[in-house]
Image (spheres, coloured by chain):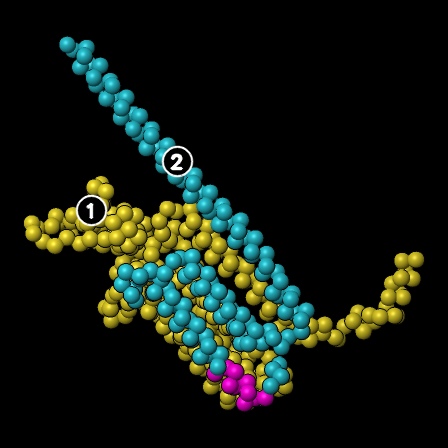
Amino acid sequence: MATDTVIDHNVDSNQDAWSGGTQPFKASYGKLMMWYFLLSDAFTFAGFLIAYGALRFSMPTWPVPDFVFSTFPGGITGAPLIFVTVMTFVLILSSVTMVRAVQEGHRENKNGVVLWMLLTVIGGLAFLGCQAWEWTNLIAEEHMSVTTNPFGTHTESGVYLTDSHGHAYEAGAEKETFEAGDGYLIHKHEGDWVFREFQTAGGTVGQQEFGPKQFGALFFFITGFHGFHVFSGVMFLLIILINVAGGVYVKRKNGYEMVEKIGLYWHFVDLVWVFVFLVFYLL
Amino acid sequence: MSTHSYEEAKKVVFKGMILLGIVTLIEVFIALLGNGHLISGFELPKLIMYPLMIGLSLYKAYFIVYEFMHMRYEVKGLAMSVLLPTLLLVWAIIAFFQEGGSWGERRQQIKDYDTEQAEGVESMNHDADTKVLEGSH
């Protein structure tokens, strides 16, 4: 009985499918598997970002993004989110040049592919450079680390009693005030942390405290993981770029499918940045 | 494989670049407006700001996947086998955010308990001091 069924099955309908050679999804094995790899990678990133959300919900205060990310190269401060917007544009541009490379590949235009892939590599390197600056600034200038987060948040409005060096204000000097929800950065003065003292509108005297330390760990880990994806993407782009220039894919006559596959990966890196940007910088 | 001609495809890419750029600018604009950086004294309610920014980001993601990654031109089975599993994340988000809120409540409980204990010890010390003083009389 069982044997009969199998034989009928083969003869009647699916003989072609079982003998191989057809593509149910009309995509090559490599391209399909690239999609499934990206799906699994999306779950990895989603796991990290959801962990960020869960930890953020578990803390009474959280660093204010438009205060934390308000520096710009050249010593400019008080420019909220401007630098990271530039970084986002760089990544979008490199995604656009990648689409152009894939299109030129479909036309079997080798020089076009080389040109647009080269521009994509430059875009990727520019993004990594921006990220290196951002990290350097956070670590070396603002002293944020995986375990210490000098970015705190005021829960009540009030007035500072000591200045940025930790000394009491001179008589008659104008004292700095703050509102509830304002962010502050605890500075280091001659190697020591300076926790400024303040008095809230309610009359309580207190001093600055470190912000939730999870922020530093999550920031460096998640943007680092994304940056590592960008870095490996640049490496793969370079390898395939060399192959393109060497004429490897001309012989395959499949519309430079390898460029299309690395293109999928590169767009995915941009896609993840959309959400990293949303979670870390916008919300 | 795109169904339109090469010239049309080039135009779609250019339009996509402008679109993604503008959506990003709108997001940053909402963030700055919402946090009171643009008009002093005016802050957008978070209840309006957050859904707007999440919605715009999802639109950007949709555009990247469907146009730049050519999902629009793939067989439906491929698209569904990649996109449908991501719906599992909806539950992950609900469950873990709920969990995070609960961690927050526990942290607060522990903090309250610790302050209570510290105050209790202080008042006990105080009682002991008065007793010693009374005894010396």
Task: Report if residue A228 lies within the magenta region.
Answer: no
Q: Is mark 1 on a helix, strand or loop?
A: strand
Please state the chain letter of the residue tagged with numbered disc 2 in the rendered image.
Answer: B
Question: Start and end of the magenta stretch?
Answer: B5-14
Please state the chain letter of the residue tagged with numbered disc 1 in the rendered image.
Answer: A
- Mark 2 surroundings: few (<14), some (14-19) or many (≥20) residues within 10 A: few
The vertical placement of A152 against A13, above or below, is above
Residue B101 location, x and y as percent?
A: 45, 45
The vertical placement of A185 against A269, above or below, is above
Q: Which mark is residue B110?
A: 2
Chain letter corresponding to the colour yellow? A
Mark 1 sits on what residue? A198
Residue B136 location, x and y as percent?
A: 16, 11
- Residue A131 occupies quadrant: bottom left
Residue A219 location, x and y as percent?
A: 39, 58
Chain letter corresponding to the colour cyan? B
- Which residue is at a point 48% across and 83% down the rendered structure image? B14
Label 1 – label 2 distance at C-alpha:
26 Å
- Which residue is at a point 20% across and 14% down the rendered structure image? B132
Residue type marked 2: Ile
Residue type marked 1: Phe
Q: What element carries label 2?
A: helix
